[in-house]
Amino acid sequence: MRYKTLGKTGLNVSVATVGTWAIGGSGWGAVDRQDSIAAIRSMLDNDVNIVDTAPIYGRGYSEEVVGEAIKGYDREKLIISTKCGLVWGEGAPKDGRDVSGKSIMKEIDDSLRRLGVDYIDIYHVHKPDHLGTPFEDTMSAMMKLKESGKIRHIGLSNFSIEQTEECMKYGDVEVIQPPFSMIDQRERSVLEFAKQHDIGVMTYGSLGAGMLTGTIRTLPDWDPSDMRFVFYDYFKEPKFSKAQKLLKSLDKIAEARNVPVAQVAVNWITVHPLVDTALMGVRNKHEADENCAATAWELTAEEIAALNEAVAEYERETPADGSPTKR
C-alpha cells in the first residue's frame, strides 16, 4: 500500500479509501451485510487506513455497517470520514439538504452513535443546501465540533471554488471530496485550487461506477432507477461509446501487465498528483482485494502519458453539458 499526506491535516492516508455508498443499498440493488463487512475488513487488512461513509447512504445503514466492520481494529490507526447536510424524515427539506448549524449539531451525535466511535477524523459538509443557509452558520457549527473534539478535521464535498472560498472565511477547510476519474474531470479546477491552498483531496467515482473496470462493454439494460443511470451520464450515448474507446487504452496496458483493467484505472488515479486518496466502492472481498492489489505497483511515465492522452481525447470528444448530478 502506498500513502500520501492529506494536505494540511498532516494525516498519512492510504492512496485507497474504502467507499461505502453502494453498501448503503439504496439505488444500488441488493447488498449483503456480511459481504459488506468482509469487504471493508479486507481493505483494512490490506493496509488501507481510511473509510468514508455518510448518513444518507441507506439512511444510516452504511454508517452502521462501517461501525460493525471496524470493531476490533485499533481506532487510533483508523481514519473515519463521514458527512452531514443530507437529512431525511419528518421536517426534512424536500431535497434533504440542510446545512444549518442546528441540523449539523444533531447529525454529529447520530453518526457517532451509528459508527460506535467517540470522534470522527474527517467530517464533510455533504453539499450546500437550497435553504439559503449562510456558510458562516455552517462553518461556525463545524468549528464548534472541532473545538469540542467530536471531529478532528473539516471537509467539504461537492463545493465549488467560490463556495469553498466563502467557507474559508469562517473556519478551517482542510479536506475536499469532489468527483474525479478518467471519465469525469469537470471538477479538476477544484482539485487544483485545493492543492494551491494545501487542502487535502479525497476523490470519489474513481472507477466510474464500474465503467472503468472494463466489465461493462455493451449499453446496460438496468432499471431506470438504478443509481448509475440517475447519477452518471456516461452509461448512455454518446458518452458510452466514447468511454468504450477510452477503455481500449486501458486494455492494452492491462494485457501487457497481465492485470485486470480495473487495476490500471485504480493505479492511474492513485498516482495522480492532484489526488491524495481515492474512494473505491466495494461490496465484497474480491472487489476489495482487486482494488488493493492495484496499489502494489505503479504505471511507468510512458504508460501514464499514453493514458493521459486517451483521457484528453475523451474530453475533447464528449459534450460539455450533461454533467453527473453531484451526490
Image (cartoon, grey):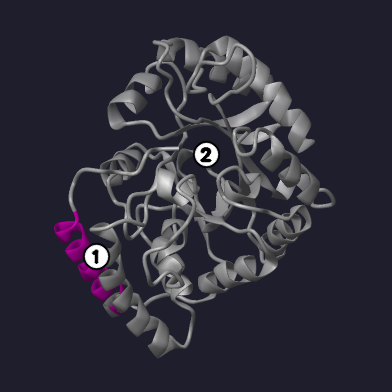
Question: Which sits in the foreground, 225 or 292?
Answer: 225
**Residue 308, quarter of picture:** bottom left
Task: Give the residue type at disc 2.
Answer: Thr
Residue at label 2? Answer: 9
Task: Give the residue type at disc 1.
Answer: Lys
Quarter occupied by the N terminus:
bottom right
Segment colored magenta:
303-318
x and y percentages locating residue 235 in the rendered image? 36, 57
x and y percentages locating residue 105 in the rendered image? 64, 15
Q: Residue 242 got which mark?
A: 1
| Relative vertical location of residue 231 with respect to residue 270 in this rendering, above or below | above
| Relative vertical location of residue 274 with respect to residue 297 in this rendering, above or below | above
- The residue depicted at 39 percent of the width and 21 percent of the height is 167
Residue 239 is left or right of residue 209, and the answer is left
SS assignment at label 1: helix
Question: Which sits in the foreground, 247 or 271?
Answer: 247
Q: Is residue 244 visible?
A: yes
Q: Main secondary structure of the magenta part?
A: helix
